[in-house]
Image (cartoon, rainbow, N blue to C red):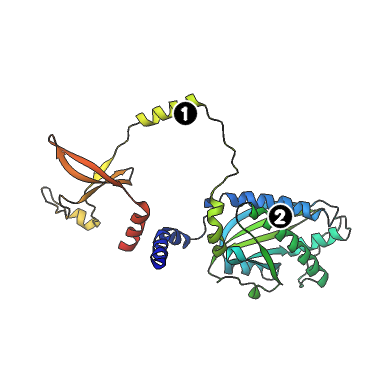
Amino acid sequence: MSDLRRQGAALKDGPERLLDAGGISIERMPLLHVIFDRMLTQCSESLRTLCSSPAIFSVISTQTERMGDILSKFEGRVVVAIFQAAAWESRIILGFDHNFLASMVEALFGGDGTEAIVEEDRPPSNIEMRIAQTIFDRVAKSMQASFEAVVETTLKFETIETRMDFAVIVPRTTFAIITTVKLQILDHAGEMYLVLPQPALNTIRQGLANDTTKEAVARDPRWVRQMQNEVTRSEVKVRGVIEERQFTLADIAELKVGQTLQLQATTRSRVKLECNSQALFWCQLGQAEGHYMLRVDEAVDRDQEFMDDILSN
């Protein structure tokens, strides 16, 4: 019985898995943006206990890239921390660039921001690494608290890396969401990065799909009734498809007036009822009072239709 359930789940999730092969759809996880906003607010509050200058965080971009491309861009300019997210069955990456660390070092040691950040091609110092460790812990706690409202989240620190060869948490061809965050403190700016690989998002995606934060809008009952009446009176065109055949341009060019096209359908074949090229119902074809009639049997299972189209090709 358990094997049958697993097979059923695999078939049911088939369309999702095929869609995932093309990357991650951020639009299907609207709560992700809300969580990031909450997290950055908490990060600002958390850093107030470390330095007197206010730290302002803002999201620059959230996009999908392959893990190998992300790590290649990080090489030599970003310090990353790897955290284990046990409930997500995956690991995630947080990263700070050189300007982020330099800005935080100056703010923590009482700088006023009048001196420009020196661009140096060198590995982070021991002091910078210790500061990075402290800030990583605070960012992780803010991230954990923000996600907890939606999905179970526990982030456990593993290691800090400056060489990206040691920061590979999933195969380099795996897609991931990378969110770039801008830090403004004193008169300096730096960047922070949050990398969530696709295996982690697959685990928590259901919790991120339903935006429960939207406030319910008061509805006017009269307006609702008017809309319902007008919508139900609208006319739509439907068509019954007995059989579908594919032709090449050469086949069409060879058609002649009076030529008969043989159909494989029989009187027992079901007819697909469509509207705007969208399959709606399976029907039975019959006759009544000299007219062809369609009797609706069942609604079209779009997931199964999608799988059948993929397998037939």
Residue 260, image x and y in percent? 12, 51
Q: For residue 10, which quarter of the picture?
A: bottom left
Report the disc number at residue 224. 1
In the picture of the structure, the residue carrying the numbered disc 2 is 182
Residue 289 sits above or below residue 137 on the image: above
Of all residues shown, which one is farthest toward the front?
Answer: 1
Report the disc number at residue 269. none
Residue 256, image x and y in percent? 13, 51
Local secondary structure at mark 1: helix
**The N terminus is located in which quarter?**
bottom left
* Residue occupying image coordinates x 32% and y 59%: 308
Residue 310, image x and y in percent? 35, 61
Q: Report the amino acid beneath label 1.
A: Val
- Mark 1: give few (<14), some (14-19) or many (20+) Cα within 10 Å: few
With 112 as the anchor, is 252 left or right in this view?
A: left
Residue 136 sits above or below residue 253 on the image: below
